[in-house]
Amino acid sequence: MCAARGITKSQAARVLVFFGEFMEGGSMFKSAMVGLLSMLAVLMLPQAAQAEYADVVINNYADAAGMRPAVFPHWYHRIRFRCKVCHADLGFKFKAGGNKITMAKIIDGKFCGACHNGEISWSVENCGMCHSGVPGTPTQIHGSTVQRLVAPTYKSLGKPAK
Amino acid sequence: MKTKYFFLSVLAITALLVVGFNAQAAQAPMKEVKSAKGKVSGANIFNRLLKKDKQRNAPPAEDGIHDPANDGTHVLQPPLIAYDGLPTTEFGNYVDWVKSLDDGLLKPRYDRFDPTVEPLVMDLDIVREVRASMPDVVFPHKPHTQWLHCSNCHPKIFIPQRNANVISMSAILLGQKCGVCHGKVSFPITTKSCTKCHSKPKPADWKPPKSEASLKNPWR
C-alpha cells in the first residue's frame, strides 16, 4: 500500500518516530497543527509511479548497503545498442535482479562495467547516475505485465556472497 | 492527551475532505450533461472508474521511481527528448521501436565496439495455428533477429523445431515464452496489441474444433 505510493515501511516508521519525539513536549494547538499538516502531507504524496515502461529497478544489495537502488532505463540503452549486445555478448539474463551484479563485478569489467568504464560510456565514479532510485523500491521491471497482474515476488537478497 | 487532540484533528480534517469530495463528485458531472427534456443523471459518463496516466513518458525526477533528492537524477535524459520524431504506438514506451529501426531513424550498435557490424537478419515467418477463433499467429524472425541473437531464444526459450513448443496466452502473461520480453521490454500484451501477433485471418472454411466431451459422446 505504502510502497505503491512511493514510500517504504522504514520511511514511514522513521516519520512516526519523529512524530513521537515531536509530541513529547507541546501544546494542544501544536498537536492539532501537526495533525492538520500530516493529513495535508498524506494528500500531497505523489500517486502511483509513472516511470518509463521497462525501467528496471535493481535492489539486490543497494538498500542493505545504504545506497539508493540502481535504475536501468531500457529505452535509453536500446536507442544505442541492440538487445543482443547485453543479453547475448555480456550475458545479462532476462530477469530483473537475476544477474546478482555487484560493484566489484562492474569494476572488473563485467555486466555494466563492460561499457561503463570511461571508454564507451562514463565510468563508475558517477554513483548517482545509476543509484538514483527512491530508497526502498523493490527490484522490478516497471510497467511489466507480471508486475501489473501478480503480486511482487522479488525480494532483497541481503548482503552479497563473497 | 496531546495524541488525542492530534487524532481528533486528523479525524476532523478527514471528515471535512470526504464531505467535500463527495459534494464535488455529486456536483461536477451534473454540469456536463445538458438535456433539453430535464435533468439527467450525471453518473452516465464514460470511463467513470478508469484512471489514465496524467503524464506519459515523465522525466526522471517526476516518474516516481527516481529519487528527486538525488543530484544524479537531474542529469539523466528525459525520455521525451529522445523520442522526438520517432513513430508512436499506443502501448509500452509509446514508441514503435521496430519501425524506427526499419526507417533508419535509430542506428543501435550490434557490436559493443564496432558501429559498422551488421546484424545477422533471418527473414522467415513462422505461422502458428491457433485452436480458438483468434486469427493465427505469424511470428516474423526478421524484426527479432534485427535486435537479438539466435542464442537469446534458441534453444532455451523456444526449441527450434516444428510443433515442439506449447505456447499459451496465460504463459505469456506470466512472463514465459514470448512473455520473457513481450510485456517487460518489447511491446506489451494489451487489448490494442493483439493483432500485432494474431495477424493471419482464419481460412474461409474454418470451423471451431469439437470439444473432448462431444468427440467422446457415444450417442453422437
Image: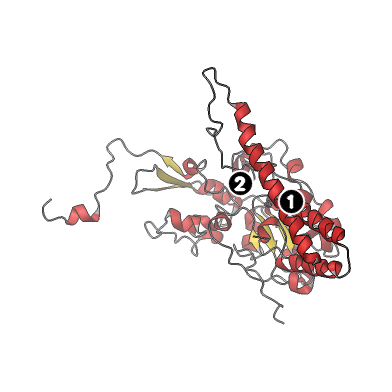
| Residue in the picture at 57% in, 47% down | B187
**Which residue is at the front of the view, B206 or A27?**
A27
**Which residue is at the front of the view, A120 or A14?**
A14
Q: Position of residue B108 (x, y in %)?
A: 69, 48
Q: Position of residue B8 (x, y in %)?
A: 74, 58
Q: Please name the residue that numbered disc 1 is placed on.
A: B13
Image quarter for residue A3? bottom right
Q: Position of residue A29 (x, y in %)?
A: 86, 58
Image quarter for residue B34? top right
| Residue in the picture at 41% in, 59% down | B165
The numbered mark 1 sits on a residue in which chain?
B
| Residue in the picture at 69% in, 76% down | A158
Going by the image, does B194 lie left or right of A15? left
**Which residue is at the front of the view, A144 or A93?**
A144
**In the structure shown, which secondary structural element does the residue marked by tag 1 occupy?**
helix
Q: Please name the residue that numbered disc 2 is placed on.
A: B92
Can residue A118 be seen from the camera position used here?
no
Task: Say which amino acid is labelled 2.
Answer: Gly
| Residue in the picture at 47% in, 60% down | B158
Q: Position of residue B114 (x, y in %)?
A: 73, 54
Relative to A61, residue A3 above or below? above
Q: Residue furthest left?
A: B219
The numbered mark 2 sits on a residue in which chain?
B
